[in-house]
Image (cartoon, rainbow, N blue to C red):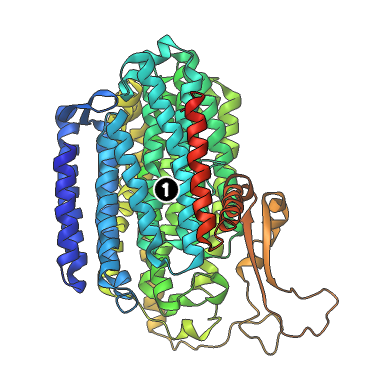
Amino acid sequence: MYFYTLLLAVCVIVAIFLTPLRHKVWVATGAVALSAIGAITLAIMAFANGPVTLAEFHSPLFGNETIVVDKLTSLFLVIISVASITTTIYSKGYVGGYFNRFSPAHISLHYSSLVVLVVSMMMVVMSSGGFSFLFWWELMTIASFLLILFEADRQDVRRAAINYLVMMHIGFIFLVIGFVLLYNVTGSANFSAIVDYFKMEAPLPLFVILFIGFGMKAGLFPMHVWLPEAHPAAPSHVSAIMSGVMIKTGVYGIMRLMQSIDQNTELLFDIGLIVLLSGIITGLWGVILAAMQNDIKRLLAYSSIENIGVILIGLGIAAVGHAAGSDLIGMCGLCGALLHTVNHSLFKTMLFLSAGNIYSRLHTTTMNQMGGLAKYMPVTAILMLMATMAICALPPFNGFVSELLIYIGMFNGVSDGHEVLYSVAGIIALSLIGGIAVLAFTKLYGVVFLGSPRSHHVAESSEVDNIRIGAMAIPAMFILFIGLFPQFAIRPITMVAEAISGADKAIAINHFAPTLEALSGVCWVLISIVLLLFALKHRLQSQRTIAQGPTWGCGFTAPNIRMQYTGESFSEGLENIGKPLIKDKVDGRAVDKGEIFPSPHNYQVEHKDKMDSLFSLWWMKVMHRINEWVMRLRTGRVNNYITFALVFFIVVLILTIVGIL
């Protein structure tokens, strides 16, 4: 299995390197499209006929393993396929701007890594566990590391890539430890063996070890610090596939863990509390830090952390509900978490691709250098408005549906008296997350697309090519479909939830159906009213002469572009609350309160996560110290180098004599 898969990957990579520069993208797109067609075909077969086993083999470390597609795998294969096709097509216009800057080999390496990333993500969710899972997990990490390094001539990119690589391998070590423990106790390292392990040994240590390993990839607090660094450094289409899809492989691992413990209600309750608490902290931390950011891609990165928190809140409520004996609460939370996993992959892909459109025209992602872009990039503005409304869970878009399902589960918990305290905590947390998310994305959209241009680059910008717009239309269609027809979108989700929890899907369908059908009707009524008002407005204005004039300036006689909200001023109130969470990196000096007639100032502030120092910067400082110590040995004298070699041999001899070596 490994041999044929790797051989096929090598053939694709060779084809990419041999293809002329401007056609490399089509080879990569063809490979990704074929992989997606195969994956979606397997997903349909698994939904229709049950699990599909592709291969059975004996791994070199962990015994018998399989490559199998079940309903949970199918859902993730569809997510990976849609996002992969979208981002690969989009990359044609984005990467084309770098043809004069990088060599053909550099572009070939980028597209090769993109194809390997897609294939490795698919194989991760199809692997039953053990060696095959770890192999493809590591290949996924290496491929994404190379993709982040696309602009490796920039120091911040190199730093972010190394930070990402180190953090991912810390998580990988936890996964290896977890699978080794599983194999030593049960004789198998497959996910299915976790059920037996929990019956034979104390379950919480293994769960925590694997939860940390998967949580590192998912961006779970406090292991999230790589995300806000890696996404701004990577090309926008890479950020889209990493944030929209790759971090979901961590969510996939957590779901597999929870699937293994569904029958043990006491354990399920304890683990449900762990997941719920982690989701609340992760969601609140992510959304508060997102609202403070003045860089588009950093804001979107922290927003991904927030949405991982929302997914975990749904999973936590599901576990607590099932443990309390309420399949209805469990199915509500689980269906909401699964659907939000799908939804986030769609609107976050659109958001990062929109950021890529902006960066390709302005060559910056700093919001305070923008403004008024809707006039110059109208299609991008419309698509990003759709995505921002979806991520803020506003109807008639998909984000509203998934969060509604989680709310229904928690409100049922309150009304039925099942673990009321935890349901209330989830309701409060999700409400706060949703409110701050609206603040964050109102800031993002308002500062970037509305108002007046803050630089001449905005006035000189124009809309991107049709290929990029067409690629963005793919997730846009799914966003609208789920938002407008939720009663149909929920059916495959309930099938996956049934496979994970064992509860009857009819419980969810019978409970959801009236609500979702009513929601669909309300959305169509809302759209009809908006279209009717627009048509009425157009008809009334067609009979009048429309005069244009300046916007009222609140009494100022000479308004200018500086008299509008910046990203920093927009979220100033929240920053006063969130001060303990951040450390500021300031460039320049702010206007002092005593300056009645202030001189020109240059003031830029970057809000850094305090967790970065605790979980990321320490190892960089250690490596810097080690490097300084090693550099002292580089004396340039041959005599010293010979002495070092002799000392090494003497140490080896002594250790051998005493029996250590």
Give residue 608's position: percent from left, percent from top: 62, 57
Compare residues 551 and 38 and report the one nearer the observer: 38
Residue 537: x, y in percent? 41, 74
Q: Quadrant of residue 508?
A: top left
Position of 130 relative to 137 (above/below): above
**Residue occupying the point 41% across, 21% down:** 181
Q: Going by the image, does 523 lie left or right of 453?
A: left
* Residue 440 seen: yes
Most foreground residue, 419 or 590? 590
Q: Which residue lies furthest to the right in this view?
A: 594
Q: Name the residue under label 1.
A: 399
Q: Total label count?
A: 1
Residue ranking furthest to the top: 200
Q: In this view, does 404 lie to the left or right of 245?
A: right
Q: Is residue 25 above or below residue 372?
A: above
- Identity, as a three-letter code, of the amino acid under mark 1: Gly
